[in-house]
Image: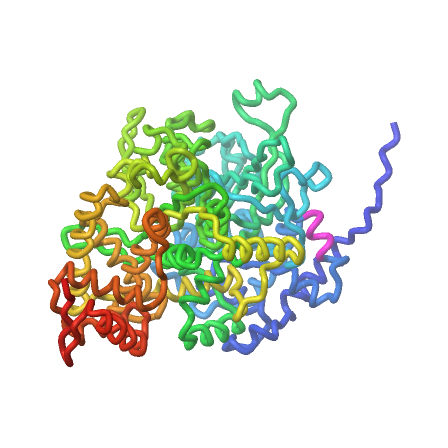
Amino acid sequence: MAALLPIDIGVRYDEDIESLQTFLTNFKDTSMSAMDVDGGPKYMNMIQRVLDREQSVITLELDDLAAFEDSVDRTVAHINKNTKHYVDIACTIIDEVLKTLTPTNPDIGYKDSVLDVIISQRRIRDSNRASDLDEQFPPALVRRYELFFKPLTNSKAFAVREVHGAQLGHLVTLRGIVTRVSDVKPFLQVNTYSCDACGHEIFQEIKQRQFTPLTECPSQECKSNNSKGKLYMQTRASKFIAFQEVKLQELTDQVPVGHIPRTMNLHLYGDRCRQLTPGDIANVSGVFLPMPYTGFRALRAGLLTDTYLDVQYVHRLKKQYDEIAMTPEDEAYLEQLKSDPNVYSHLARSIAPEIYGHDDVKKSLLLLLVGGVNKTVGDGMKIRGDINICLMGDPGVAKSQLLKFIAKVAPRGVYTTGRGSSGVGLTAAVMREPVTDEMILEGGALVLADNGICCIDEFDKMDESDRTAIHEVMEQQTISISKAGINTTLNARASILAAANPLYGRYNTRISPTQNINLPAALLSRFDILYLILDKPSDEMDRLLAEHVTYVHRYNKPPKMDFKPLEANMIRHYVALARAKRPVLTPAVSEYITSAYVSLRRQYKLDEQNDQQFTYASARTLLGIIRMAQALARIRLSDSVEPIDVDEALRLIDVSKSSLEDDTNRRDIRQDRTPLSAIYNLVKEMTREEGPELSINELRRRVLQRGFTEANLEEALREYSQLDIWQVTSSRLVVVQ
């Protein structure tokens, strides 16, 4: 039978080797040359640092190669189609280049590994046999670096279901969310044996998932003596690299209707390990390869073959606040924001600008993103700084849209619904590991949202048994597990943003607020703010809302504001800047918070007597005021909390039930919202606290804090003294009973 004729596929490996060699030795990066001390070729500087043991990773950027060759159709295209082979080619070229360079410090030091000592001893012992010295050591053993390819920046990111068999061996980029990450374990790359007869070290390079250990010594000495020396594995002289397996799942917007999300196994080696954590959304580039099943799984699978992605480069799309990198344009814009006196209002109104109104709700959500300061007391007790908020309101007030926006803005945002979440789905489930068959814990939504925000929609629809699972998370910020022989405590340092409907779907004004809310006191006290948003008919407001909604539908964007709304990315940048601050309480502010808390408790007692009890004022309420005041100080980029921060925190807590008060007062009399009436109500509050005789200076201070002017106060004093309701002197005000 005649041999098959070779097919020319248009790839000249010798030309590619030559072009890669020229690229590595001559490429200069204009952006890097200013920063490099040497100012030499970019990759030659890298290789020199590898030789000097200052660096162990070489990332070869295909953008650089495309710019050097001024084409993406030559070597770059060949690398994209046969990446694994070109990794070996590039390593061989770098090995040759390393031989021509001299290290800065050639002596063996304490930092060198066992292998360096073995190679050095072998060189001294076999100095007369230098010709076959290189044959004794496999290249993978001698290499002190790892090589990875970084794909082109304009390469398309695929969903898992879009990767097909035609792309086997290609460099592909996948986008998805990380659902499971294994432990980092050593992966055998080169196995070393020593012979008990001749004393030679024998090296076996492992290139497949399975290998057969050597038993007889293949050295020339044993063969000539016919001694068949026995080989013993030497773990210290073997080479292991870190290995980690990650499961990547499709994003929800990539899944077609009626399908479930698909997953792909990622294999991370060496320096690429520990770059991904559960909950990360990332673009992962790697070589798409087949892998036959081994062991008993092969008997069960038959002819089936599994696929995986050998990871070359990882780009996390939503980084933690402390890892966010900024461009010079972003920094310049942030400097403008720092000097903007209305930055608090602008940031709040930039949250979901498509949604009309809800300004105070958006301000509270901004505080949720910024958060308070976490504290650890000397004896190890922790006080949480994360703010928890519950939005309770009638259907159709855009609660779910606000939750979705916050989950998108937060670096780690997990969105889930009450009906679709069980207790273990929120906390942690005990599962059986498919590879090792051990019982393992798989974190739920709250664990995935660690150091982030967990948005729970339809909070009132959750089963009571499932809802109790988050009690510990909301205050202690841990999850204690005692299941299947596993006793542990997991971190869940997450802020909870919940949305719920009242008991009967809509708020019922005929029963008390506590009955409407229908959440247990133990849970209510854990929320720093419980917002009640009622949907009440009002001609003017309904018209404005309808105009806003129709504008969004016509033009696909929100109506123009008096300022340009910030992008989600810029909100993230400013929040990262604000979270770097750790504001402290001054003695004056501490005293002010104390008196405010005492008056809150007094008001709670009065509301309870009048059956208008809205929420539970406890010591947690005091901590909530402190957390919100710290968040407001962070937004101002201040290092200390001011009284205005405390006032704004108290105002937000007060406003959270304003829609309820409007509804209550409407049953008696239409409420007057003019400054005169507001100042009159303030005087009524003060007389309840201090008696009928008040200080004019104290009244002026309170009026100005509420945002009114001196002119409003003078007008109120004149108006009500003419009606003989107040008697005013130069320093005192007496309320006529």
Left or right: residue 625 compared with residue 580: left
Whether 81 is among the magenta residues is yes
Position in image of residue 180 (x %, y %):
46, 38
Quadrant, the N terminus: top right
Residue at the image point whose x is 29% and y is 75% from the top = 715
Q: Is residue 160 above or below residue 50?
A: above
Left or right: residue 650 compared with residue 183: left
Position in image of residue 483 (x %, y %):
30, 26
Furthest residue toward top: 300
Q: Quadrant of residue 627?
A: bottom left
Furthest residue toward front: 723
The part of the chain drawn in magenta is: 76-82
Taking depth in this image into account, of 130 and 536 the one nearest to the observer is 536
Residue at the image point whose x is 27% and y is 31% from the top = 487
Q: Is residue 250 above or below residue 702?
A: above
Q: Main secondary structure of the magenta part?
A: helix
Furthest residue toward right: 2
Position in image of residue 258 (x %, y %):
63, 31
Q: How is the image coloured?
A: rainbow
Taking depth in this image into account, of 98 and 391 the one nearest to the observer is 391
Whether 77 is among the magenta residues is yes
